[in-house]
Image: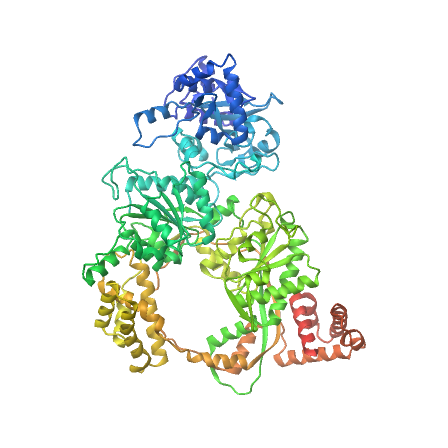
């Protein structure tokens, strides 16, 4: 005989693993029952004949389970009459339609005076023998070729898995050797050939429906005909989609070998699955969550490591943006409060029957996630009031003291209560940090660690107090830290990563951007990237040629040009034209698509908002723009705020931009719907991180984006939105500031995995301290005296004189040059930054570093450094005029290919920094302007003088046109003036064709050049 490689062979392989060799083929071969053998999961073989299609129950195992475990409850029901079983089934049917199977498995089924437990939960290691016995009494079963439909009796599903007769998973199996696969054929079968109106396939009546072949697995929790949306349930391969080679069998074997064990299924039901929404929502509009593979895997690995290694560890979880970190954090938080140590001798363990952690603290540096995480954990938790969402430091203190199991706070709020908590060193904490970036690289984490560590002995001397503070700033043994981020920096890797024998720091768990994109969880924001390069011509308004710092001057010149009203007007027109032509008119995302304009500053955002709003008003207001920024800003002598400009309060910006409420219904203002009113959001920094808006389809960037910020900002576009049919080709990025190379360099480190080549060389602290000591700004006894006062809790007034003596030396007594002052301040700030990051993980203690750290923390803000170039740069801006501005499209719809190799980051720069030793290039004003124009204005091959002559000649020809006076100059109606001007200049330019074909082609083919030319001519002639 030859090997069987068809679907039936795959069915048999799965059934063997689940049931222990008693597959249908073997039963038929011997004509009877085969005893289970080998390594198997203990499932029973089910028969299609025992399946009740109306109630979607395997009646044999349903009644067998109840009779075996709860016969006393069944006896109560039997007294109600001969149809008692029918009554139970109908009661079950009514409640499962109303609440779903998950609710009934967790809560049980009450009928008359009886209460039926439909599933016994998996016990903890410390649970009673009875709890273990109860779980063992659950009946898991597997039925092949199940006829499920009363309407179409011949329709069958390849395999259905049951728990106590209740279905939890259906499987359609395909085999690639027969030319079919799960990705296409399995999903197509569910969408087009399976009747989701039949009870078995009703929403939430069976948890998950899987299309499976020998290589891949796809899943959905809601069958909806052709609109059914499947998600991959794969491990990933080479940090991308798919599954790795399995030397012992099929690539997809983890599904039946790992995921479908009894303990695993029970764990998923108890601790992962959640029915989103509330009872007042329409049941079929709610969402049933089943974990994706990487979410299931990371949570289980974290729990297992904590159980077997105890408290006091750090974990870095590098999961791609938009790939479900909020749910992973939620699941981890809820399960960490239950984890019990495998051995009482483990760090932090008290006993094997007591939880390892007293409290789980979820810290987020994104305020908008606070409520989201709090609500999610409350939904997952069956026990109420274990979650405390703290909005005040007093509430956080109370939650910790009362032993609340899960405490959610923000990194902005956490440090303020450090000095109000006495001693929590006898408690154990799991600290989950969302988006672990700079907020955990410095003093915020420092203060958090001090809270975990315990109070200070006020009777001790100053040195004892300082050492206690220093020890408490370390990653304490009574706390484990779980840091989730998509974009780890080197400091984050060193603080939270796992150090390997080769010295590298790597993530504990990885779900890469590459895998997320390939699997369709997020979209590739770099697939349709267009860059514009600005071209400028700067002319000098003065004749003298002072020397300027060339690098600073170039930077200032560009900033000056980019915030010019003419520049913003030109870009605003391009952005709006693109958005209307490519997003609004084609009705992207079913007509719901939104765009975001990212600007350099609040002032730029305000000017963009004004320019775009005016253009929209001229177009009849087809939709509106909305602006978002923090605080107030004065521009042109007028003070602006977000609320004043939008006409509604800040807290409504996000909601109005979406256009619908939490239930998906259009928002109405004064009786009118605003569902599609606000289509463009204009920002500077707000909403660049942590803002999930699936309707975002286009982004217009006029801001320097680099490193982590580039990834975070552009990732606002990557949220998938199946309900709107959102695809990668629906995304557009128009970038006016950055090059393709810039963006590629920013994304490459985070596309696959990120590691750190080694630890930071802390010896730089010795060098920095030596440099500063030599300057003489402070005497060491003053540093000692300051620390003694500070750690004895002296009044702030007592600290000031000690600091002010050093300030006076810095400003006057030492007669330091401006560059020497700047050099000292740079080194002081570097010392504070490096020590603040490294103190928590240093394997040793240097008391002098700790003392100097606290002294410099108070000293640095008082050190005033004058930038001697500042006044000259201001003079520079006064001495130049913007004579022309245009844009050229450099890359159109460019797909940026990222590097798939692992990125290795270097530790922080080990060299002391300062201003000395840096040669500054000094250029006269004419050379700066020339260099600037050569860099940014290359469109014409003509010389600047020829360009100027050409421009003036065109303006004169426009004024000489026979219709100029009558139809343009003497007309007050702006609309008619614009039409006339466009007609006149077009005719003038056509006459230029024979004189300068290059110039004419540039005008004709480059929209941005044409708009800038028209605008400039119009401004020139008035």
Residue 594, image x, y percentages:
60, 53
Give the image location of residue 175, x and y in percent: 52, 31
Percent of width and height locating residue 532: 58, 64
In this view, 527 is above or below 251: below
Q: How many numbered marks does the figure carry?
A: 0
- Of 301 and 614, the residue lying toward us: 614
> Could one spot residue 526 in this view of the protein?
no
Judging depth in this view, the residue of 127 and 661 nearest the camera is 661
Q: Residue 735 is drawn in which quadrant? A: bottom right
Q: Nearer the viewer, residue 704 or 255?
A: 704
Q: Can you say whether 695 is above or below 305 in the image? A: below
User: Is 704 placed above or below 60 here?
Assistant: below
Picture quadrant of residue 1012: bottom right
Q: Which of the pair 283/775 is nearer the observer?
A: 283
Q: Residue at x 23, y 74 (%)?
A: 779
Q: Residue at x 59, y 71 (%)?
A: 535
Expressed as whole percent of the image width and height from the top left, the position of residue 947 reads: 65, 78
The answer to whether residue 472 shows anywhere in this view is yes
Res. 267 image quadrant: top left
Locate the C terminus by quadrant. Answer: bottom right
Residue at image position (44%, 29%) is 107
- Rendering colour mode: rainbow
């Amino acid at each position: 005989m030859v090997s069987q490689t068809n679907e039936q062979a795959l069915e048999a392989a799965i059934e063997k693993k689940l049931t222990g060799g008693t597959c249908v083929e073997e039963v038929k071969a011997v004509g009877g029952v085969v005893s289970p053998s080998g390594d198997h999961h203990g499932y029973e073989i089910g028969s299609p004949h025992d399946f009740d299609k109306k109630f979607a129950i395997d009646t044999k195992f349903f009644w067998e389970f109840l009779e075996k475990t709860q016969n006393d409850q069944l006896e109560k029901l039997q007294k109600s009459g001969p149809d008692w079983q029918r009554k139970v089934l109908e009661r079950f049917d009514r409640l499962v339609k109303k609440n779903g199977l998950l609710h009934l498995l967790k809560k049980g089924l009450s009928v008359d005076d009886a209460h039926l437990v439909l599933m016994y939960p998996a016990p903890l290691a410390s649970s009673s023998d009875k709890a273990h016995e109860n779980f063992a009494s659950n009946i898991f079963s597997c039925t092949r070729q199940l006829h499920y439909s009363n309407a179409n009796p011949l329709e069958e599903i390849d395999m259905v898995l049951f728990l106590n007769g209740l279905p939890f998973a259906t499987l359609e199996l395909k085999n690639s050797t027969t030319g079919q696969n799960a990705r296409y054929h399995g999903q197509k079968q569910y969408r087009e050939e399976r009747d989701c109106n039949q009870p078995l396939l009703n929403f939430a009546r069976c948890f998950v429906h899987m299309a499976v072949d020998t290589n891949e697995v796809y899943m959905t929790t809601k069958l909806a005909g052709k609109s059914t949306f499947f998600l991959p349930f794969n491990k990933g391969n080479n940090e991308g989609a798919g599954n790795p080679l399995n030397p012992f069998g099929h690539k997809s074997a983890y599904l039946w070998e790992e995921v479908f064990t009894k303990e695993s299924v029970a764990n998923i039901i108890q601790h992962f699955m959640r029915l989103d929404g509330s009872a007042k929502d329409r049941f079929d509009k709610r969402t049933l969550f089943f974990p994706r593979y990487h979410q299931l895997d990371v949570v289980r690995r974290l729990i297992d490591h904590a159980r077997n290694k105890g408290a006091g560890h750090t974990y870095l979880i590098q999961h791609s943006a938009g790939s479900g970190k909020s749910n992973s954090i939620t699941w981890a938080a809820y399960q960490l409060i239950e984890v019990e140590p495998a051995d009482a001798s483990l760090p932090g363990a008290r006993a094997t029957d007591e939880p390892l952690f007293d409290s789980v603290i979820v810290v987020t540096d994104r305020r908008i996630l606070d409520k989201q995480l709090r609500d999610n954990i409350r939904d997952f938790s069956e026990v109420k009031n274990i979650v405390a969402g703290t909005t005040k430091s007093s509430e956080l203190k109370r939650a910790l003291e009362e032993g609340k199991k899960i405490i959610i706070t923000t990194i902005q709020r956490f440090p303020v209560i450090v000095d109000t908590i006495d001693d929590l060193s006898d408690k154990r904490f799991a600290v989950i940090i969302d988006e672990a970036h700079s907020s955990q690289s410095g003093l915020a984490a420092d203060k958090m660690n001090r809270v975990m560590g315990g109070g200070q002995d006020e009777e001790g001397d100053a040195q004892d107090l300082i050492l206690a503070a220093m020890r408490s700033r370390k990653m304490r043994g009574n706390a484990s830290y779980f840091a989730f981020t998509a974009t780890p920096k080197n400091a984050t890797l060193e603080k939270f990563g796992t150090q390997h024998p080769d010295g590298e720091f790597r993530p504990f768990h990885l779900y890469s951007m590459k895998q997320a994109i390939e699997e369709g969880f997020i979209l590739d924001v770099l697939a349709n990237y267009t860059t514009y390069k600005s071209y400028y011509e700067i002319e000098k308004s003065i004749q003298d040629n002072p020397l300027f710092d060339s690098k600073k001057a170039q930077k200032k010149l560009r900033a000056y040009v980019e915030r010019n009203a003419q520049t913003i007007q030109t870009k605003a027109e391009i952005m709006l034209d693109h958005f209307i032509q490519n997003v609004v008119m084609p009705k992207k995302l079913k007509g719901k698509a939104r765009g975001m304009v990212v600007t350099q500053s609040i002032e730029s955002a305000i000017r963009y908002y004004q320019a775009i709003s005016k253009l929209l008003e001229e177009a009849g207001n087809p939709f509106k723009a909305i602006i978002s920024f923090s605080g107030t800003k004065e521009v042109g002598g007028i003070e602006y705020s977000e609320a004043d400009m939008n006409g509604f309060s800040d807290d409504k910006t996000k909601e109005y931009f979406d256009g619908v409420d939490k239930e998906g219904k259009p928002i109405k203002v004064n009786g009118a719907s605003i569902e599609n009113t606000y289509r463009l959001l204009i920002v500077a920094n707000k909403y660049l991180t942590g803002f999930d808006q699936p309707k975002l389809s286009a982004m217009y960037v006029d801001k320097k984006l680099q490193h982590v910020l580039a990834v975070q900002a552009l990732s606002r576009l990557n949220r998938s939105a199946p309900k709107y049919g959102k695809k990668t080709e629906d995304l557009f990025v128009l970038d006016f500031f950055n090059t393709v190379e810039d963006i590629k360099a920013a994304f490459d480190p985070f596309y696959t995995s990120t590691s750190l080549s080694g630890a930071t060389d802390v010896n730089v602290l010795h060098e920095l301290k030596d440099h500063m000591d030599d300057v003489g700004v402070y005497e060491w006894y003053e540093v000692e005296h300051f620390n003694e006062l500070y750690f004895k809790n002296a009044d702030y007034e007592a600290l000031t004189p000690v600091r002010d003596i050093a300030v006076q030396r810095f400003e006057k007594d030492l007669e330091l040059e401006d560059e020497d002052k700047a050099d000292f301040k740079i080194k002081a700030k570097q010392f504070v930054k490096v020590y603040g990051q490294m103190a928590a993980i240093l394997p040793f203690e240097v008391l002098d570093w700790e003392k100097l750290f606290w002294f410099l923390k108070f000293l640095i803000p008082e050190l005033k450094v004058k930038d001697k170039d500042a006044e000259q740069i201001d003079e520079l801006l006064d001495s130049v005029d913007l004579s022309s501005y245009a844009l050229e499209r450099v890359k159109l719809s460019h797909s940026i290919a990222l590097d798939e190799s692992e990125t290795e980051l270097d530790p922080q720069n080990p060299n002391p920094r300062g201003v000395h030793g840096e040669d500054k290039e000094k250029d006269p004003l004419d050379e700066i302007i020339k260099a600037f124009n050569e860099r940014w204005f290359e469109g014409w091959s003509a010389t600047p003088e020829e360009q100027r002559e050409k421009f003036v000649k065109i303006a004169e020809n426009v004024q000489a046109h026979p219709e100029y006076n009558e139809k343009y100059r003497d007309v007050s109606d702006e609309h008619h003036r614009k039409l006339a001007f466009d007609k006149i200049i077009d005719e003038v330019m056509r006459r230029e064709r024979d004189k300068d074909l290059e110039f004419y082609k540039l005008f004709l083919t480059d929209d941005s050049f044409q708009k800038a030319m028209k605008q400039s001519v119009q401004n020139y002639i008035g």
